[in-house]
Image (cartoon, helix red, strand yellow):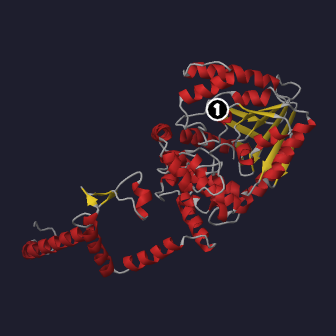
Amino acid sequence: MSGASGHSKGSSVKDRADLALNNEFLRKAVKYTTEKLKGGKLKAMEEHGNWEEWRERGKQIRLHTIAHLDYYLNLFVDNARANGVHVHFANTAEEAVHISLSIAERKNAKSVVKSKSMVTEELHLNHALESIGVEPVETDLGEYIIQLAGETPSHIIIPAIHKNRYQIADLLSADAGETLEPDTKVLAGYVRKKLREKFLEADIGMTGCNFAIAETGSMVLFENEGNARMVTTVPETQITLMGMERIIPSWADLEVMATLLPRSATGQKLTVYMSGITGPRRSEDADGPEEMHIIIVDNGRSLQLGDPEFQELLNCIRCGACLNACPVYRHIGGHAYGGTYSGPIGAVLTPSLQKNIAEWDDIANASSLCGACYEACPVKIPLHEMLVYLRRRKVEAGHGNKLESAGMIGFSKIMSNSARFKAILKLGKMGQKLVARNGEIRLKVGPLKGWNSHRVTPSLPKKSFRDQWGTMEAEIRNGLQEMAPDMKNRMEQIVKNREKGGGNGHGHS
């Protein structure tokens, strides 16, 4: 990781979250943007009409594809190679980096323009390119901004979500060597002009991949800026790095994904640019790369295959909807998670891909387990359940907190016995008189320290739900007893009326 946002040794998700919570601008910026994205998604869902049916269809496509991943990968590779593409397999991040650098060295490349490149963030490829004298240039506007800042993405879809236009103006002014107004048109105009030169100079264009179509060996990119088209048409050589799970069977399946992904990500009905690329430039083509490489990256993904608890992780289409819905992410942003992928998907994906419980044993705790991520996910990945599985795995591996374990044992004993539970509530009501004021407990001691640093704990009510329920139950019972004589008289009258009507059941009551 580059910059201060990396997962530095010795830091914890709590430490990083504390930094974020004390950064007022970051909290406001993240909250504003995620609420805007979430609102756009909800509106797009409503306008769509039968969203849940398409959501279920998307889930079934992904389940089917991952269950038969070997077949569809082989089909994709055969078709891509038939189209003139050089296809490489990389089991590890190191292998993927080595293949990329080998191509760059063979081409005597001096610069690489990049787009849609979360996988290259995962591989830390920019640092590797710089180490051999190749300049990597991010061309997605948000990625370009955080590259100048020396930071990592804070959001899958909007990597610079934590920056405002004044901060961006400072970064771009330093890059330009002159003061640029903090006006979005001025700033975007500068970047557009600067990147146009980079596109024309670049030796290699490098992209990620939203979806790979098995039936034709094609790759598909979704974007809103048009830069990916420049990256894939101007340089003579193109390298695409794709996670091995990005496969879908057919173009017909793409229709479902092209409906689900933009609506879930930004609330758009359709992404502005959707490019389907099938091989390098042909003789009749006006533009395109002379040479095209696709590097299929495993890097821990195959570890999920056959795992009943985590295989559905590979269904993810990287829309970012779970981040926008998550109450934790919306308060702390992406850098607090410490990895390439943040939010609920990052909290599960990072430790699951690496199986490195010792390093990532706290990240699964960055969740309220409210299930908002599952409700937001366009392909119904049960991330909230996976977070519970990760916490269990952490404890089973011996990384659990002893104090927490003791607390859970005590909690179990209290909750399994109504008499104990009632006694504890009574003691709690008595004890809170020392610290509660106006229905709130603001004490910052022990377990309450972390919670009350940024919110308050409500005091126990004078009358608990159990007490209220007991009162209600008694009132209902008394009411029924009062009604009993009247009900008895009414039933007797009904019987008499039926007898008068000849016993045929048609008498009037």
Question: Is residue 372 found left or right of 196 in the rendered image?
Answer: left
Residue 102 locus on image (x, y percent): 89, 42
Q: Residues within 10 Å of mark 1 (few under 14, many from 20)?
A: many
Looking at the picture, which amino acid does disc 1 mark?
Ile
* Above-or-below relation of 34 to 56: above
Question: Is residue 56 found left or right of 467 in the rendered image?
Answer: right
Residue 465 locus on image (x, y percent): 26, 67
Question: Where the C terminus falls, by quadrant?
Answer: bottom left
Quadrant of residue 126 within the rendered picture = top right
Question: Is residue 470 found left or right of 251 in the rendered image?
Answer: left
* Above-or-below relation of 344 to 385: above
* Above-or-below relation of 221 to 485: above
Q: Is residue 504 visible?
A: no
The residue sitting at the right extreme is: 106
> What residue sits right under mark 1 in the picture?
145
SS category of the residue bearing label 1: helix
